[in-house]
Image (cartoon, grey):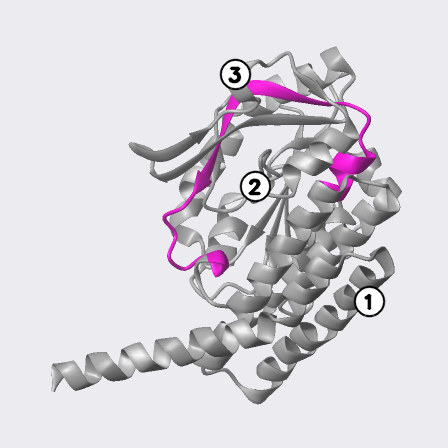
């Protein structure tokens, strides 16, 4: 029998995308699918639309938690308890894929006994206006097989992307904790490390860049969680003895995130509770990293991270001076 593939799709105010989404899913050439949609208390009629259009359709499962989740990761965690498939695939409500995408990935997984299969990922503004064509592996060699350490290293800066077909055994081994804003991205990388064999497939996944309402397009206070998950990745890199360049890459990302969110905290008007959440993350992870640097005698990174608050102060001050000059010039 063909293995069952479970596709998880978080839904929130995506009614205008749902007709195309259902068309893509209904017309997949691979038919043994379990499609789990988790509505996060949409206010645009998405849930009602799905309830009406998916009535008595066996391969679809429409869910709602008892209360609003607020992030895709929380809803993925909820959906995973309903998964029955041998493989897992994630899809956002506004993304789409080739009609043979699942079929090709499943057959490639079986042919190579692979734990993870990575399709091409095309970022786009519209179907007619593709902005970047990310074809992996490099040089379009679809016979390349990665081991777990290679895949983990390449995933840190998304040199290989995270939209893939995965064996559910990986989730059974690691579990899934959706408490972080980007827990899904953390577990993609963890699963690369736990996998024995990762391969590529010449079929296309399309990643929508043209949804201004998407949470990734706005300043959202929970995005500061990225610092937490990169710190977890740093600890994993330490535990598994990764080369210094991999750990340095993670640290560079944490440094940039610290500056980005520190500045965002200063210029965005959010309530006191959300401000405190961000401050707690920003203030707790820097001391932890300092201790790691001292332990590993990495004094250069210790100095760099110690100077981050000064960098933030100088950037904010410079921005205020420029803004003042522009206003004065305008008068």
The residue closer to the viewer here, 241 or 169, is 241
The 10 Å Cα crowd at callout 1, few under 14, some 14 to 19, many 20 or more, is few
Is disc 1 placed on a helix, strand or loop?
helix
State the mark number for residue 91. Answer: 2
* Residue in the image at 59% along x and 14% along y: 142
The 10 Å Cα crowd at callout 2, few under 14, some 14 to 19, many 20 or more, is some
Where 274 sits versus 241, above or below? below
State the mark number for residue 306. Answer: none
Where 287 sits versus 75, above or below? below
Front of the two marks 2 and 3: 3
Q: CA distance from mark 1 to mark 2?
A: 39 Å
Q: Identify the mark nearer the N-term, 3 or 1.
A: 3
Q: Examine the structure image and report whether residue 193 is included in the region drawn in magenta.
A: yes
Q: Does residue 88 appear anywhere in the picture?
A: no
Is 154 situated left or right of 123 in this image?
A: right
Q: How many marks?
A: 3
Where 262 sits versus 211, above or below? below
Q: Residue 75's x, y, as percent?
A: 66, 56
* Residue in the image at 50% along x and 82% along y: 270
State the mark number for residue 291. Answer: 1
Is disc 2 placed on a helix, strand or loop?
loop
Q: Residue 88's x, y, as percent?
A: 70, 35
Q: Are the two marked residues, 3 and 1, in contact with CB atoms closer than 8 angstroms?
A: no
Front of the two marks 1 and 2: 1
State the mark number for residue 140. Answer: 3
The residue closer to the viewer here, 243 or 180, is 243
Q: Identify the mark nearer the N-term, 1 or 2.
A: 2
Is disc 3 placed on a helix, strand or loop?
helix
Span highlighted in magenta in the image: 189-216
């Amino acid at each position: 029998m063909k293995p069952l593939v479970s596709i998880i799709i978080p839904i929130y105010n995506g009614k205008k995308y749902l007709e195309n989404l259902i068309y893509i899913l209904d017309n997949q050439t691979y038919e043994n699918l379990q499609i789990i949609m988790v509505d996060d208390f949409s206010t645009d009629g998405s849930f009602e639309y799905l309830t009406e259009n998916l009535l008595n359709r066996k391969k679809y499962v429409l869910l709602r938690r008892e209360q609003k989740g607020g992030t895709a990761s929380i809803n993925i965690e909820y959906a995973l308890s309903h998964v029955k498939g041998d493989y897992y695939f994630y899809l956002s409500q506004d993304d789409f894929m080739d009609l043979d995408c699942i079929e090709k990935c499943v057959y490639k997984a079986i042919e190579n006994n692979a734990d993870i299969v990575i399709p091409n990922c095309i970022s786009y503004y519209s179907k007619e206006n593709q902005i970047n064509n990310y074809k992996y592996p490099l040089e379009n060699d679809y016979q390349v097989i990665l081991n777990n350490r290679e895949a983990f290293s390449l995933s840190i800066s998304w040199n290989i992307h995270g939209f893939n077909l995965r064996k559910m055994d990986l989730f059974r081994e690691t579990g899934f904790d959706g408490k972080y804003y980007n827990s899904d991205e953390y577990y993609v990388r963890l699963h690369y490390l736990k996998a024995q064999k990762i391969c590529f497939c010449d079929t296309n996944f399309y990643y929508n860049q043209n949804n201004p309402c998407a949470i990734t397009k706005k300043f959202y206070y929970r995005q500061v969680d990225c610092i937490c998950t990169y710190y977890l990745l740093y600890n994993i890199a330490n535990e598994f003895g990764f080369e210094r360049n991999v750990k340095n890459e993670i640290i560079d990302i944490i440094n940039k995130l610290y500056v980005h969110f520190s500045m965002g905290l200063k210029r965005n008007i959010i309530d006191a509770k959300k401000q405190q959440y961000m401050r707690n993350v920003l203030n707790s992870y820097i001391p932890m990293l300092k201790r790691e640097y001292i332990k590993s005698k990495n004094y250069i990174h210790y100095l760099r991270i110690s100077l981050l608050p000064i960098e933030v102060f100088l950037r904010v001050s410079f921005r205020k001076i420029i803004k003042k000059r522009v206003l004065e010039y305008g008068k």
